[in-house]
Amino acid sequence: MSAGTLAAAIAAPGADAGVVLAEQYSTFWVGELFFGIGVAEVQEVLRHQPMTPVPRADEAVRGLINLRGQIVTAVDLRVRLGLPPRADDQLPMNVIVRSRGEVVSLLVDDIGDVIDTAGIAPQPVPSTMPAKLQYVVRGVRPLPESILLILDADRALEVSGPSGG
């Protein structure tokens, strides 16, 4: 299957005009939250990588990693979403995504599988969700065992200030 086929898109009911949701998602957890990013946006998934801190950067920017000679910014989704910090013995994993022409790492707690949501109607973001979460979630897909939150990587990576956006 080509990336275009994998990202075969359907418009989400109630979503902004032009916002499209893929059908196949690379999944991961941040705390108790189960997220997915369209496979066309994900470059690769990696175990914990050593990071070089960036002085004076936003607190969500945990550092820079060297990805086969390419310097990549690592953004911690726990910090970005205002969640409690990871346990000291839990190392984050990296979901490497392409966002706005750049390659960036999203630091997450655990990696899931690639899942196909064809035939599962996307739902709008619940208004009861915390504002930071509403801002970065494009829609939800109810699955038999959980609810998949479709992450908007561009918005998740907006770390312009101490509040993360």
Image (cartoon, rainbow, N blue to C red):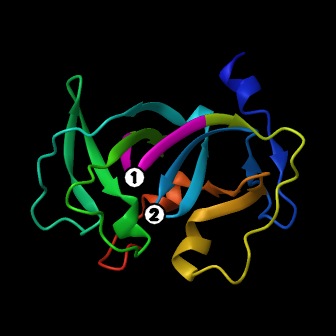
Task: Label 1, secondary structure: give it.
Answer: loop
Kind of residue at badge 1: Asp
- Would you identify the image quadrant in which residue 148 lies? bottom right
Helix or strand or loop: what does disc 2 sit on? Answer: loop
| Residue where numbered disc 2 is placed | 31
Question: Where residue 44 sits: x, y (%)?
Answer: 44, 29
- The residue lying at 79 percent from left, 67 percent from top is 124
Drawn side of residue 115 relative to residue 63, left or right = right
**Can residue 104 be found in the magenta stretch?**
yes
Is 125 situated above or below 5?
below
Instruction: Give me the residue at 56% from left, 65% from top.
Output: 136
- Mark 1 Cα shell of 10 Å, populated few (<14), some (14-19), many (≥20): many
Quickly name the residue at label 1: 109
Magenta region, mostly helix, strand or loop? strand
Vertical placement of residue 89 versus 47, above or below: below
Viewport quadrant of the N terminus: top right
- Location of the C terminus by quadrant is bottom left
The answer to the question of whether label 2 and label 1 lie on touching residues, with beta carbons closer than 8 A, is yes
Residue stretch in magenta:
103-113
Quarter where residue 75 is shown: bottom left
